[in-house]
Image (tube, rainbow, N blue to C red):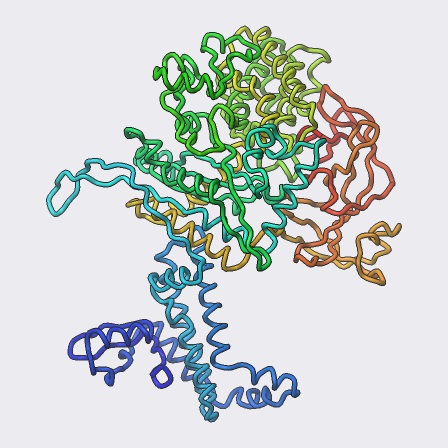
Amino acid sequence: MRLFHPLPPNGYLCKFLTCGKTYDSLSNFRGHLKKYHQGGGDIVQPPQQVQNPVNNYQMNVDNDVDMNDGVDNVDNEFDQPPELQDAQEEVTPDSVLRCISKSALTFVSKLYSIDNVNRAHVEVIVKLSSQFIHSVVSSIRSKFQEFDDPDIEEIFDITSNSFEGLLTESQRFTALKSCGYLIESIPIPIDYAQDVVNNPEPDLAQLPLTGQFVPFREVLKQFFEMPNVFEKTLTNYENLLADENNISNIVQGSLWKDHIAPKFEGKTVLPLDVNYDDFEPDNLAGSHQGDHKVGGTYFNCPVIPQQFLGSLKNMFVAQLILSDDRNVVDGNHKAFHLLLKELKFLEEEGLVLTINNQCRRVYFTLALVLGDNAGLHSVLGFVEGFTANYPCRMCRMHKDLVKRMLFVPEYLLRTPENYANDVATNDQQLTGVYEECVFNEVGSYHVALNQSVDIQHDVLEGVAKYSMCKILENLIYTRGYFSLETLILRVNDFSYGVLESGNRPPSHKLTQDRIMNDTLNFSSAEMLCFIRFFGMMVGDLVPQGDPVWEFYLILREIVDIIFAPSFSPGTPEYLKLCVEIHHQMYLNLFHVHLKPKHHYMLHYHIIMRLIGPLVHVSSMRWESKHRELKIIARSTCSRKNLPKTLITKYLLKLGFRFLSGCALQMDYDLGVSVSVPKALVDPESIIDQFVNLHPVPINFECLSWVRLNGTYFSNGLALHVGFTKDYPSFCVIDRIVYLGLSENFEPNIVFVCHKLVTSSFNRHLYSYEVNETNDWHAVAYDDLSTSFPLSTRVLPQGGLYVCPRCWL
């Protein structure tokens, strides 16, 4: 039937009596005939052509085709060398069907993976694409009528119906599920609520409150069974455990070594971090602001190689609920009971992964629950709000002591024992605990031990804002070192470079009212940029040794430490000292009390020893995950069962990743490439050690820029390449040499640089003073000491400086 009745442009029309229904695929039409019109299959006819501009255009194209054009070319295609003839003889209808079926499935899966293309758009695109392909194939087919070959006819039929079995969303979902690429979400029954429904008259009804849960055992299984993912992760895990001098991951902290890992002795176990945060999918200034606020729960495995850890595609959605639905009796347990059940299964039973055709049982355990302060206090069962008697989830210090204490006595720290007593007391006014933490049901987790902090909201949107406002108030209005107009001029004229140009502090927010009222509302990235470069902006206007400037330098040092991706074992104690000095100076210089966010910083040195670098548990990257779901929400007008809409689209996007086999591979973009003679690029042959070709090519491909795992490199940027005499060593990129792709299909990038000599560290400007040299140096991307570049700046007072991004 498909051979003699290929899909017409407007589909198959059922002309049995007055039926008149049309179908986009032969299988659907055949099913319709069997179900409703037994014996009526001989009346299949295409619908009549409707005269409209689209069909007129199609008919004109068909009429303009010269039926003899290209026939000679077709004959020539068969007059090929024997090896090509053999290759063409292997093209059978079955092989074409497999190829087209896979390509069509990949095509629709890719459409679903685009955040701002909603599912209704996919439906339209697939139907139009199907009609387009049918029209094109019909035109080509007419030129092959002289070949009486049933295989060719069948191949044309297959090609003409490329989207057969994928023309409806139900068919597409079924196809993706049957291949194992689409994971189905599970409804989370939370509670019931009364609401007005029109059925057909307005009436009160009990409506279910439900969220959507992703069975992430399936996500983890598919993710770690992708090529080389498990091997890379396990190798990285073992390397981290062997490195005792450079702390860069949670598995190097005391929480993992002393409390979690011993419970899995003799087993392969990997940690999981869970993050909870609320986000607003609607317009924040709109009339429905807050009506559909969503609580998102995400997870990741923090021991995958660090260069992939910050990638949003390696942060997975675990569940979505409407935030207000959690405000019921026992709301946390009702909202997270499926999540807890899944975590307990992964910890107790584990997953059997098929790695290189061998089965291996791997256990996954909950290490941390992450989020901002409001989110953590809410889901972990602590009182919300900074005005509570006991506002800290890590200790039992009263709010009156929080305002002035510079350290936390050990007896006030929360422990499993005193936490159990607080739960039994059942009085949040006396304990700060309003319910037992539901995550304590997971064997490896206890809220008094598995602790984390959020440096984004504690520091960048808290302590840094308070501190910088006090600093500006004193330097401008009390001490008069410079005016507000001078500050604005320097902020606007400062050379931020290509790396920080997008984080430029908005100078229009630098007003006297905002400074005096501590309401300098920069974003986190803008505040971080402002703190980093404030010393270079106005440091020359402030005398050496000024106490307020010393206060800024202490803050700058703290920011450097907490945003460092790794640290040495002695760093937490140094951070403790810096925080105590900062808080003491804040009290003495400005005569104001400490706020709860100041207090949280007193725990930072403890948390660093416990879980490693604090930057890895910051909310900054997790909040970027919200953007993906916000785009999906804004691409559709429907707000009915919004968690279901968002989670379905997300799982379709995740399915495309599994279908395309996108594992732990470097994300890269290459700039314009120019072939340059080796004598100009590398006169001293320092690149030869990185070249695997013999002889070495006479020309090298040089790039104008390259972006590797989201980090941008270009000529003129500085790289940190090691240490010399207690100072970091830098070099400036002169050429970016592209040596092709490696065996893992990742770009081989070598930076040809000239060295900089670090002469001193100018603490007043908080920058390294460097001098240029004529010495050349070549370094591969994989060999960099730190994976992010820096900018060099010549200051008005003279000298070339490199401003560090973090603790080196």
At x 40% / y 37%, what residue is drawn?
340
Q: Position of residue 497 (x, y in %)?
A: 66, 37
**Residue 608 in which image quadrant:** top right
In the figure, 313 relative to 52: above or below? above
Q: Quadrant of residue 278?
A: top left
The quadrant the C terminus occupies is top right
| Quadrant occupied by the N terminus | bottom left
Q: Nearer the viewer, residue 761 or 277?
A: 277
In the rendered view, does 138 fall on the left or right side of 15?
right
Residue at x-position 87% and y-position 40%: 774
Observer-nearest of 782 and 630: 782
User: Does 50 sit above or below residue 325?
Assistant: below
Q: How many marks?
A: 0
Residue 658 place in picture, x, y as percent: 50, 56
Q: From what the image shows, is residue 89 above or below residue 638?
A: below
118 relative position to 225: left or right:
left
- Give residue 738's position: percent from left, percent from top: 73, 55
Q: Residue furthest left?
A: 201
- Could you say which is closer to the camera, residue 376 or residue 756? 376
Q: Picture coordinates of residue 96 (x, y %)?
A: 49, 77
> Relative to the observer, which residue lies in front, 659 or 674?
659
**Residue 122 visible:** yes
Residue 529 quadrant: top right
Inspect this view and state whether residue 492 appears.
no
Position of residue 303 in the picture relative to residue 292 (left or right): right
